[in-house]
Image (cartoon, coloured by chain):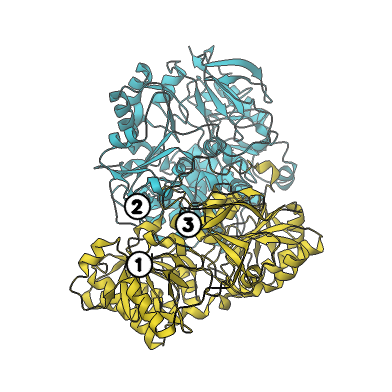
Chain colours: A cyan, B yellow
């Protein structure tokens, strides 16, 4: 099987394959231009007659569960990444697959992390054909170097749900690591020694996979409350000694920045939001877990506090900062997609206003709407931006693919998308003529905020109008680019081969760009 | 179109049609014998591109929402019955359909009540072809008299979800009356002036219907928390003055019995459960809202209190009695399917241990298990029982169909099913040679408890063994029947025509019995 075939140029001018790993895919047509006509994936109808009448679905080991689930060559195995770099289950699954001599698997994680670097051996020996999912770090590098047998497909969190819902990716076996579960398979992420907060990334897997295995280290008597995952979708429950390392859900990026430049960017961004009239009583925002984004959250909370206002909701990735705001009464609700620290986990357990969400509610573009469009302002990162406001979030300027798409693409549908970014990193300008990989089309990116000025997308005449007469350093994106190039020089293009190692999906399942092998 | 065709004799010896309203149906094959092989109903894939980007789905009226949903002849319209006899929306829907000249609709309520008697005019004039759903009171009588154009199909709560999930009933438009909702369509039953508790009966409708309309009298800013119904499934939101009369969720059957005979039955039942070892620390039960069942709950709570035990969960239909147990700490959880009084509503709002469930979690036989089998003992009613323990819950001994199936069939899968019933009603014996309508096969009914003795199903050798030497009046069912007939005489058979007016579905979608027109 060819890894990919039939290249065409898509609506953002990128060359993308239309056959990937032997399956047909649609090139990106423009935002909102691809309207699906089919029906959702229809899982098999089950029968209670085939399940234990007392509801006890426990089996003795993950190995037995995989065998009972019919694990065989070519299957698709899914996992979630709520434990982030503290996951202990994915490696075990493929150890077992290898032990059982199973080959050519597709691994469909919601994201992968350095803790899964071990899987490189199985990617090399053919146990795993390819990863379809975000790859943070070593697995991304391995892929960039052209070493993966199949072609990687990266999807946003919402795109991952969409692909499962639409039947584009049919999961044979979903393995769901759960900090708390009952023998029937009801499960949550809130309780137990490995509590990681929530399990929303596994929701679609549970609903649509052929077989669903819950792995837990905290088996409670039925009913496990809350049931973030419904046991009615679950085939087997496995008890293990430890299901994940919750301390490792804390990523290095969840500390507030101390860099003066980044603090300045945060301040400029907040002032911009204020002058643009975005911050008001009842407003909503989403800020990631990066240092700059956290600082922006602090500015927002100060404005709310000083003016006696209250935000209606914060979309999160939660950690202690939004939790403090919730507990101080500065916001009604945290709508949380994944917890980034143990304060987030605690709050989710304790605060009824800390609500668990999923890619289905928040991000699925093939739903009857989703939450993303209702957020007043979203603060996102980017590795590169171009003069047309197209942005990259997966590859670095050297072409290495070291990050996943996450919820980034989905968030672009907010009422205002701001990318607060430094003008250069390691003396490499961030604003380019052309980004290495287009992850988000410029038409959805409204503002670029740097330490030396703020560029508003010319499409947002309303924002330009509102900021007229502002003391903020409003510039064109070309001016910002020139300024950076004056300091750093014009950056070199990355050294890439023609070979495609990965594609990036848009939120509607179309292919927005290809990632090339690094030389 | 013939109303029904091709009668065959099913596994419980009843003559049932295999073509009903022009569609094929499968005769009952025996408990656990029909294993489905197909796939679930696959709803159309939606796209955010077709929904308001700001998430505001409100339209000015129910009429506009129905027109936008494409209401036309022959469609299936669903509603839920959480307001029970206080529903205000179903009549409006068909008033509008009539006004718009739409004909031949199938109404698919989760149950109908006397407050919807007005719909008889639309059943007569052809606006509505038939009701598929439980019919309590006047609509049941209308059907029994052979006046409905189509053939009625009655399903249990679980069977209703199963039929929707499996695509047997494809809902064109689901209209969901919601005590609280936001403009995106997130909705719950807990809050607002018409709070009725939960919306679980509408869950499957929201997931699988082509178009979903939320009707509310309490529009809150996004997000409406908790979202028992996900806005991601919703097309339109309509605000009306009053969505339902919450006081009318209280049914006359939610008062503890004062009848000495029924109190005796309750006492015998409780003692039986105790002697059989069913009541213990951590046990679970479900008792309906009938007077006898409530009294049994009181006995259970006294046993728990006296022995320092705690039940793990009560499956409910909640009202103030289980709520008092929860608040006293006699039970960890109420797993609630519908609230029967305003104490239930309040508790659902206030107590984290009062958990909302749905026919999907609790009753769907075509899931990977459901909750029904995990309940230690369930207390149910019946209009008739026969000497083989088959029971009837929909027709009276005169043949009139005046009740729905509800969750009754689904509950039969508990570890022990007890029917506490009086030996006779209005001097008509309840135990017959043959029930008028078989709703539940005798093999699933374990114990009949009457004021003059308790009969254990001969299949339950374990229970017979445990009760050996008991002082309780253990008798055979034949003995009980003879005793009643000695007092009341042998009852007359109901006067029925050959014409079938309704069929009763089993939990797996097969047809267990037919209901004949009364003469």
Q: Which of marks 2 and 3 is in front?
A: 3
The numbered mark 1 sits on a residue in which chain? B
Instruction: Report the Cα–Cα distance between label 1 and label 3.
Output: 32 Å
Residue A53 shows which numbered tag? 2
Q: Do the residues labelled 2 and 1 touch (CB within 8 Å)?
A: no
Does the image show residue A430?
Answer: no
Label 1 Cα neighbours within 10 Å, binned few <14 / some 14-19 / many ≥20:
many
Q: Residue furthest left?
A: B469
Q: Which of marks 1 and 3 is in front?
A: 3
Closest to the observer: A156 or A310? Answer: A156
The numbered mark 3 sits on a residue in which chain? B
Instruction: Report the Cα–Cα distance between label 2 and label 1.
Output: 16 Å
Residue A349 x, y percent position in the rendering: 38, 57
Label 3 Cα neighbours within 10 Å, binned few <14 / some 14-19 / many ≥20:
few
Closest to the observer: A177 or A415? Answer: A177
| SS at mark 3 in the image | loop
Residue A404 x, y percent position in the rendering: 48, 31
Closest to the observer: A178 or B137? Answer: B137
What residue is rendered at 66% in x and 63% in y?
A: B215
Residue B285 shows which numbered tag? 1
Q: Do the residues labelled 2 and 3 touch (CB within 8 Å)?
A: no
Closest to the observer: B40 or A516? Answer: B40
Residues at marks 1 and 3 on the same chain: yes
Q: Mark 3 points at which residue?
A: B13
Does the image show residue A505?
Answer: yes
């Amino acid at each position: 099987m060819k890894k990919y075939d039939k290249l065409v140029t898509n609506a953002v001018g990128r060359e993308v394959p239309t056959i990937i790993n032997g399956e047909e895919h649609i090139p990106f047509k423009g935002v909102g231009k691809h309207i699906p006509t089919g029906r959702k994936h229809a899982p098999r109808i089950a029968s209670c007659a085939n399940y234990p009448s007392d509801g006890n679905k426990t089996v003795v080991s993950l190995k037995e569960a995989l065998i009972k689930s019919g694990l065989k060559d070519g299957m698709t195995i899914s996992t979630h990444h709520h434990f982030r770099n503290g996951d202990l289950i994915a490696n075990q699954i493929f150890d077992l697959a290898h032990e059982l001599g199973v080959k050519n698997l597709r691994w469909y994680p919601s994201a992968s992390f350095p803790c899964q670097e071990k899987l490189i051996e199985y990617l090399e020996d053919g146990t795993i054909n390819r990863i379809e999912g975000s790859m943070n770090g070593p697995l991304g590098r391995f892929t960039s170097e052209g070493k993966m047998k199949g072609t990687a497909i990266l999807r946003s969190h919402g795109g991952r749900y969409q692909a499962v819902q639409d039947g584009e990716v049919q999961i044979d076996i979903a393995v769901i690591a759960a900090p708390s579960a009952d023998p029937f398979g009801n499960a949550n992420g809130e309780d137990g020694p490995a509590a990681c907060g929530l399990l929303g990334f596994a929701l679609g897997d549970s609903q649509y996979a052929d077989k669903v295995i819950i792995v837990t280290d905290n088996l409670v008597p039925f009913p496990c409350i809350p049931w973030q995952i419904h046991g009615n979708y679950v085939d087997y429950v496995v008890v293990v000694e430890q299901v994940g390392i919750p301390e490792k859900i804390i990523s290095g990026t969840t500390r507030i920045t101390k860099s003066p430049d980044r603090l300045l960017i945060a301040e400029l961004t907040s002032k911009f939001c204020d002058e643009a009239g975005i911050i008001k009583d009842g407003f909503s925002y989403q800020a990631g877990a990066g240092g700059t984004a956290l600082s922006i959250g602090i500015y927002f909370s100060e404005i709310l506090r000083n003016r006696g206002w209250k935000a209606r909701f914060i979309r999160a990735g939660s950690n202690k900062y939004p939790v403090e705001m919730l507990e101080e009464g500065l916001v009604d609700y945290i709508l949380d997609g994944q917890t980034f620290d143990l304060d987030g986990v605690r709050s989710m357990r304790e605060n009824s206003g800390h609500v668990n969400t999923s890619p289905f509610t928040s991000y699925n573009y093939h739903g009857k709407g989703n939450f993303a469009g209702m957020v007043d302002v979203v603060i996102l990162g980017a590795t590169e931006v171009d003069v047309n406001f197209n942005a990259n979030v997966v590859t670095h300027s050297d072409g290495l693919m070291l990050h996943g798409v996450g919820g980034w693409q989905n968030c672009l549908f907010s009422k205002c998308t701001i990318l607060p970014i430094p003008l250069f990193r390691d003396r490499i300008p961030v604003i380019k003529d052309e980004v290495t990989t287009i992850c988000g089309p410029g038409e959805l990116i409204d503002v670029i905020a740097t330490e030396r000025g703020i560029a508003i997308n010319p499409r947002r005449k309303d924002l330009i109008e509102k900021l007229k007469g502002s003391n903020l350093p409003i510039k064109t994106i070309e001016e910002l680019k020139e300024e950076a190039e004056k300091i750093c020089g014009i950056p070199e293009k990355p050294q890439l081969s023609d070979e495609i190692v990965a594609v990036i999906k848009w939120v509607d399942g179309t292919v927005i760009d290809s990632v090339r092998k690094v030389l």
